Amino acid sequence: MVKELLRKLSNAHGVSGSEGSVFSIVKKELKGYVDEIHEDPMGNLIATKKGNKFKVMLAAHMDEIGLMVKYIDDKGFIRFVALGGWYDPVLFAQRVILHSTHGPVHGVIGGKPVHMMNDEERKKGVKIDDMFIDVGAVNREEVEYLGIDVGTPVTMDREFAGLASTRVTGKAFDNRAGVAMLIKTLKEVKSPLTIYGVFTVQEEVGLKGARTSAYTLDPDCAIATDVTIPGDHPGIELKDAPVSMGKGPVITVVDSSGRGLIANRKVVSWLKEAADANSIPVQLEVGSGGTTDATAIHLTRGGIPSTTVSICSRYIHSPVEVIDLADVEAGVSLLKAALAKKPAL
C-alpha cells in the first residue's frame, strides 16, 4: 500500500547530504524489482530496468529540508543553520532530532519568549539567527558527550498521521511523496524502454544530485516526480496556484515563471495523451513558485527533454504537509501508462 510506504519514507530522516536512511528504505523496497541498483559518487541511488535503446530518467529527490549544527556555546545551547528553504517562524518552538554519532538526540528550538518581546519584536517574528536548540545540557561538554558537534544534521521530530478520507499529513512529503510514486512505478511498470529510476541527493540545496546523475546517464528524456503548491485552501487563491488536491497529478508546463523549467512540449503531450487514453485525471501547471530536479536535468549536456509530474501538497516546507494519497496512485498510473510506449520526440 502506498500509505504504508509513504509512512516509512516520511518518518525517515534525511537532510541534504545525509540521505542514507531514505536510501536504505528505497534500496530494500526495490530489491528484486529492478535489474540493477547502484550508488554513484554523489550518493544518488540509481535503479535500472533494462529495455531497448531509448532511455528514460525518472528522478525523485530523497532529501528533506532541515538544519545543521554550527556552534555550541559554553552553556550547551546549540546554534544552527538552515539547509533548504525554511520560513523562519515555522521553526520557532518545534521539537527536533539531532542525528549524533551516538544516535538520535531530542531537542527543542528555543528563543526569546513572546511574553518578553516588545511590540516591534512581535511584529518582526523570531529569526533563525535568534533561535537555538536546547537538548537539556548544562554545558558544551555535555553536548559533546551526547555525540553532537559542528556538522550534526537536525530534522523535525514529527510523525506521519492519517486525516479524513485518503488525506494524510507528515513531514518531508516534499519529496517523499515523489519517492513513493517512483518506487511504486518501478515495481509495477511494464515497458519496452530502459528506465533509470534515480533517487537524487541535495535537491533542496541546488538540484545537485540530478545534475550529476543526468550527465552520467545521458537519457533521451526525463521526468522528475515531486510536489507542488495547490491554491485550494484559505490564504491562497486558485488564480495564483490553479491546481487542487484530489484532482490528480500535475504536469508542469512552466515553473518558477520560466526561470526554472520550460518543459518540453512533446514530453508534456506524451503524458497528457497517456492520461487521456487511460482516463487518468491530470492537471497542467504554469507556476511562479519553486522548481524541481527537472530544471537541472533539462540543462545537462546538449539538453534533455524534460518535465515534472507533481503531487499537490499543502503547507510544503513545514513539518505538517498534507497530500491526498489518491493523487499519488493516479501519478503512478500516469507514469505506467506513458512508459508503455516511446514518446514521439
Image (tube, grey):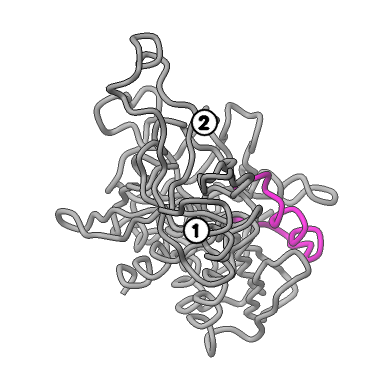
Mark 2 packing: few (<14 Cα in 10 Å), some, or many (20+)? some
Give the amino acid at mark 2. Gly
Quarter of the image where one finds residue 58: bottom right
Residue picked out by circle 2: 289
Quarter of the image where one finds residue 334: bottom left
Q: Secondary structure at mark 2?
A: loop
Q: Is residue 65 left or right of residue 202?
A: left
Inter-mark Cα distance, 1 to 2: 30 Å
Rendered location of residue 182, percent (x, y): 50, 66
Rendered location of residue 248, percent (x, y): 34, 50
Residue 6 visible in the shown view: yes
Q: How many marks?
A: 2
Q: Which residues are magenta?
A: 204-223
Magenta stretch contains residue 209: yes
Disc sitting over residue 98 in the figure? 1
Identity of the residue drawn at 58% across and 83% down:
34
Disc sitting over residue 238 in the figure? none
